[in-house]
Image (tube, grey):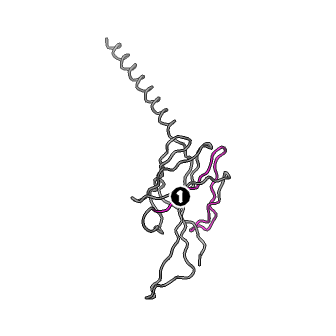
Amino acid sequence: MHLAFKAIKMKHLFSFVLILIGVAGIAQTRTARVPQARAFFTVAVPGTLHTDENGNAEHNFIVSRFIIIETTGKQPLTVLSITSQGKSYSLSVETVTDNFIVVGTSFTKNNQVKLKASKANRLWKIAFSPMKGKANENALKNIKVVGQAGGKSFKLVLPRDEQLAAPLYY
């Protein structure tokens, strides 16, 4: 009797493990694979500061933010939302035509930042800006990107965006 009870327990345990493996396999097939994603921003500073009628400097920073995402395969990318620190962002998505991109020059290290997609993968550039209010000229934290690639969903959390050098404007 005791051996029969153990056999039934083992049978149920084996069935449970098979079900877990099946569920994990289904969950993985519904999630898009995003091998790499990095966020960047530039802060263009005016060469000449404008002043108001009281002589106070008016800072007219131009902040540009974008994310480079690599997706597996060549299927289209749809980004549904970008949020960070409780703020929603409007966005535009464009395909990078080559399998590499020179993103810009690192603000702190003064070297070129380049990203390359693996063979048969595609790079995308997503420009984003706040829906309301003024753009923040500091690094963002916990940038959440929700979308679909090749009909499969993905959700990314980028810890922060990296600052790139920006030329002066006048």
The chief SS type of the magenta part is strand
Q: Dot 1, how many residues are within 10 Å of its Cα: few (below 14), some (14-19), or many (20+)? A: many
Quarter of the image for the C terminus: give it: bottom right
User: Percent position (x, y) of residue 111?
Assistant: 63, 65
Q: Is residue 15 left or right of residue 45?
A: left
Residue that carries the numbered disc 1 in the rendered image: 39
Q: Nearer the viewer, residue 1 or 128?
A: 128
Residue 103 picture quarter:
bottom right
User: Percent position (x, y) of residue 59?
Assistant: 48, 78
Residue at the (48%, 54%) spot, across then down: 158
User: Percent position (x, y) of residue 94?
Assistant: 59, 54
Residue at the (53%, 42%) spot, across then down: 32
Q: Nearer the viewer, residue 86 or 40?
A: 86
**Furthest residue to the left?**
1
Question: Is 51 situated above or below 159?
Answer: below
Residue 150 picture quarter:
top right
Range of residues picked out in magenta: 102-130
User: Percent position (x, y) of residue 7?
Assistant: 38, 16
Q: Secondary structure at mark 1?
A: strand
